[in-house]
Image (cartoon, rainbow, N blue to C red):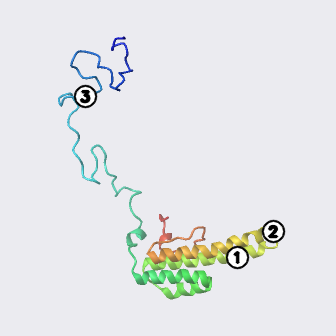
Amino acid sequence: MSDPGQDFGQGDAGGTPPPPSGPAGAPPPDAGYAPPPDAGYGAPPPAQEYGAPQQGYAQPDMSQQGYAQPPAVQQMGASTSEDNNMALIAHVLALLTGVIGTGIFYAVSGERSAYVKHHVTEALNFSITVLIAWFATTILSFVLIGLLIIPFLFLWQLILPIMAIMAANKGEWYRYPATLRLVKGPMDQPGMA
């Protein structure tokens, strides 16, 4: 029969671990040992309120150059249901009538809120861009490239106004991608994206 101290790591048939080595009665080094409170670890830092600046970190000064909001953003606010309806009409006209409908609506809408002005301007710019794209495609249709562009142009003219209609219905400030900004709107001021 072998000595239990020599069968280290095997244990007995019952699955019990080997006896701890070291002084009699001392716990093994990793058996739930917690340092005494005076071991130099100290108390945990006090919990801070969410959003409060952490110790050692400074909040940026919003008055510094580069952090000031442009004037157009300061006056942009939530839209009313009437503003949402006006914006929605502008994008529906861009989808159905093109430059003629959006141009007339731009002239008739007058000095509405910045939200309505933005959407009407975006719809007009998109309609002008689509007209220019169709004109260029017609010229290029004598070459094979123009015929390949027509399906993509048709989808572009159909999908983007639908996305703008959905955004206007939610009260969002939508900007058409890949659009010429020939008519300046509230978001086309210097410093705006």
User: Vertical placement of 134 versus 44: above or below?
Assistant: below
Vertical relation: 108 (above or below) 43? below
Which quarter of the figure has residue 176?
bottom right
Q: Along the polypeptide, which appears first: circle 1 or circle 3?
A: 3
Camera-nearest residue between 47 and 192: 47
Q: Who's the residue at 54% across and 73% down the image?
A: 163
Numbered circle sitting on residue 134? 1
For the residues carrying marks 2 and 1, which lies nearer the camera in this image?
2
Could you say whether the residue bearing mark 3 is in a helix, strand or loop?
Answer: loop
Disc 3 residue type? Tyr
Q: Amino acid at mark 1?
A: Trp
Q: Secondary structure at mark 2?
A: helix
> Few, some or many C-alpha atoms within 10 Å of disc 1 (few <14, some 14-19, many ≥20)?
some
- Position of 171 compared to 132: left or right? left
Q: Position of residue 19 (x, y in %)?
A: 29, 19
Q: Are marks 2 and 3 in contact (CB under 8 Å)?
A: no
Q: Which residue is mark 2?
A: 144
The earlier-in-sequence mark between 2 and 1 is 1
| Residue wearing tag 3 | 33
Residue 31's label in the rendered image is none
